[in-house]
Image (tube, rainbow, N blue to C red):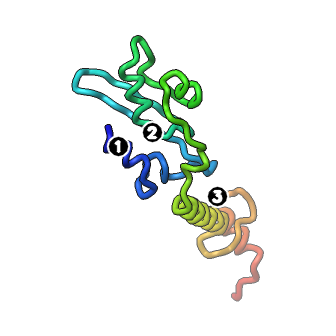
Amino acid sequence: MAAVCVLEDCPLFNAGIGSALAADAGVWCDATLMSAEGHAGAVAGLQGIRHPILAARALAHADGGPLLWAGRSAELAALHDLALLDPELMVTERQRRRLAAHRARQSMRDSTARNDRDGAPRLCGCPRRVSRRLVRSRIAMPS
């Protein structure tokens, strides 16, 4: 448990602080725990809980509590005395750069998809073969 908490605090790992960013540029954490004694707990979509693994452990050892908890981070933290952290502090500059690069690649892919294979812009939402015929029919082809 302690090792996972260390990883969640280290911005170099994709866990807790330093996690990969979602499309909304936020950190949404998940954690699952199963013990040798047969206890299990899982959390999903948490924001601002410093150690999601401790949240999963709290569920695993809660009497009659849920096995899975999704969202509602503040409520979960209050129920189990978990440390909260400003969600913005979990976002690292490294992950911001990765998200920006991903968005740039996606934008290029979307831009390329709007053009025909030969670089001609598609004239409508038609399939490529229809669009290509339309482009060629409008270009004076030498005979």
- From mark 2 to mark 3, how far is it between C-alphas? 49 Å
What label sits on residue 4 in the rendered view? 1
- From mark 1 to mark 3, how far is it between C-alphas? 50 Å
Q: What is the quadrant of residue 102 in the picture?
A: bottom right
Left or right of 22, for residue 56: left
Whether residue 119 is situated above or below residue 79 in the rendered picture: below
| Residues packed near mark 1 inside 10 Å, few (<14), some (14 to 19) or many (20 plus) | some
Q: Quick check: marks 1 and 2 in contact, CB under 8 Å?
A: yes
For label 2, the residue is 51
Residue 31 seen: yes
Name the amino acid, label 1: Val
- Nearer the observer, disc 2 or disc 3? 2
Q: SS for tag 1?
A: helix
Q: SS for tag 3?
A: loop
Left or right of 22, for residue 16: left
For label 3, the residue is 127
| Residues packed near mark 3 inside 10 Å, few (<14), some (14 to 19) or many (20 plus) | few
Closest to the observer, 22 or 139: 22
Closest to the observer, 8 or 135: 8
Whether residue 5 is situated above or below residue 73 in the rendered picture: below
Query: Residue 139's x, y, as percent?
Result: 75, 79
- Nearer the observer, disc 1 or disc 3? 1
